[in-house]
Image (cartoon, rainbow, N blue to C red):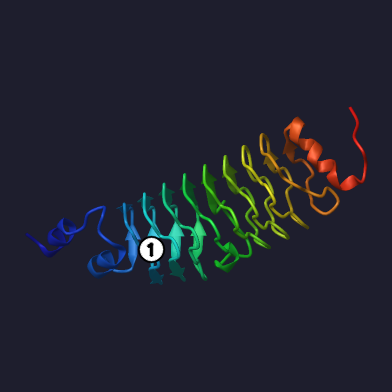
Amino acid sequence: MTTDANTSANITAQTTIVQRVSLRGRHFFAQQFIGLDETQAHWQDLEFEECEFHDCQFSDSTFRQCKFIDCRFVGCNLSLVKVSLSHFNGVSFEECKLVGVDWTRASWPRVAFAAPFTFKACILNDSSFMGIKLDEMVLEACKVHDVDFREGSFNRANFTFSDFRHSLFGRTELLEADFSEATDYDIDIFNNKIKGAKFSRDEAIRLLNGLDITLVD
């Protein structure tokens, strides 16, 4: 059996990241990670391309100067994860917990050529996207409580079916963003750019909150 064959035989979906680094190096392509417990781990200068992570625990871990390209996270816990100077492009999260993540610490290009994020049925409470340009991002059917979107750009974003209770919007670009079936958002129409945005009729009344008017039946 060749060395490459021996290496492949030693790698399973449950093999830890540090074990894979020792076997394959710091670049991972089209690999699956299933059921890993990497809580409070610290990783630096790793690159993941077209990888999938299922039911993994990454809470309170640090990914510093790492790259995630066209990756998929399903059922993972990434709460309090630190993303210092890391790059994200084409990354999707499904049914994941991402509480308390400061996305402003990641490395963002001045010009975004593709939507970097898709979140579906995730929990993103107490996180920050302040000042980030994330046009066309997807936040679908997510719990988005106490999240900071101020001074960011989310033009043409998909925010459908998400709950934005106590989240902050101020000097935020939301041109043509879709808030259909979204709930509990507080958006000052004079302090945010919302031209072309879509809102469900029943919830759109919240946009009048800053007008100092009284509504009667």
Residue 126 at what x, y percent from top left? Answer: 60, 57
As rendered, which of 47 and 163 lies closer to the eye? 163
Residue 28 at what x, y percent from top left? Answer: 33, 61
Give the left or right position of residue 188, taking residue 105 as reference: right
**How many numbered marks, from 0 up?**
1
Identify residue type, mark 1: Thr
As rendered, which of 180 and 66 lies closer to the eye? 180
- Quadrant housing the N terminus: bottom left
As drawn, which residue projects farthest toward the right?
213
Image-quadrant location for residue 3: bottom left
As drawn, which residue projects farthest toward the top?
217
Looking at the image, residue 176 lies above or below residue 89: above
Residue 124 at what x, y percent from top left? Answer: 56, 52
Which residue is drawn at the image coordinates 91% and 31% (left, top)?
216
Dot 1, how many residues are within 10 Å of its Cα: few (below 14), some (14-19), or many (20+)? some
As drawn, which residue projects farthest toward the left?
1
Which residue is drawn at the image coordinates 70% and 42% (left, top)?
184
Image-quadrant location for residue 100: bottom right
Which residue is drawn at the image coordinates 72% and 59% (left, top)?
150
Residue 26 at what x, y percent from top left? Answer: 33, 68
Q: Secondary structure at mark 1?
A: loop
Give the left or right position of residue 181, taking residue 88 as reference: right
Give the left or right position of residue 40, taking residue 196 as reference: left
Residue receiving disc 1: 39
As rendered, which of 166 and 15 lies closer to the eye? 166
Looking at the image, residue 64 lies above or below residue 91: below
- Quadrant housing the C terminus: top right
